Image (tube, rainbow, N blue to C red):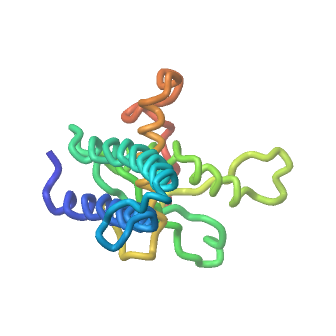
Amino acid sequence: MPDAWHLIDEIQALLDPLREMHRRHQAALDEHRDTDGAVIEARYAAYEEARRSTALEASDVLHTVAARMELLVAVPAHRAFTVALNGPGHAEGASPWLFVVNGTDLDDAHCRLAELPSFRRWLDDIRNPDDSVGTRGDAEIVTGQSHAGVPAPGSYVDLRREQARVLADRTASSRASQLPVPGSPCPAPQRSR
């Protein structure tokens, strides 16, 4: 079971968007209620539609949250890892890009990162413009700046929500057997110091 300190940060990261969604949902429903909280009769149909749309969003979010929570208590434990990668401007001294994903260790975190659509788009974006073949860019792991945990807020790209959505979609999809599953081997990352 993972240590409690890392779980506190992870649970807080789950609760903040849930609180915001609840606030938005209540505001959407309150538009159709009087000051006592009763539904205004003339707005009943709109109130029911708002209930349906908020319930659909809540259901989708709940599925993602459940998948993310399953990762938190999985054995071996999945926790946040910062994966630092050299990207554009590295040769000129630019700082590495920092991506945060859940994994069992740093190599697993890199494998999980490589599965995410937004990361693949980033690799496409850093592709060498002279590359006429259209292959993805290549980014080396900066071992000295990759670590367990999360760096200072605002200094990284947090992909844990996307990772949970991908996992939730994978488990709900009939195509699950065609996709790599967590823990499956992936190519060894290139390393840089």
Q: Is residue 39 left or right of residue 45?
A: left
Task: Say which quadrant the N terminus sits in.
Answer: top left
Nearest the camera: 61 or 3? 61
Residue lying furthest front in this view?
A: 41
Q: Position of residue 59 (x, y in %)?
A: 40, 44
Q: Residue at x 56, y 64 (%)?
A: 86
> Does residue 130 sit above or below 63 in this rendering?
below
> Does residue 52 sit above or below 95 in this rendering?
above
Q: Position of residue 46 (x, y in %)?
A: 51, 55
Q: Is residue 31 left or right of residue 23?
A: right
Q: Is residue 111 left or right of residue 15?
A: right
Nearest the camera: 178 or 16? 16
Q: Position of residue 130 (x, y in %)?
A: 84, 57
Nearest the camera: 58 or 35? 35
Q: Residue at x 46, y 69 (%)?
A: 156
Residue 109 in sight from this viewpoint? no
Q: Residue at x 37, y 34 (%)?
A: 183
Q: Is residue 24 left or right of residue 87?
A: left
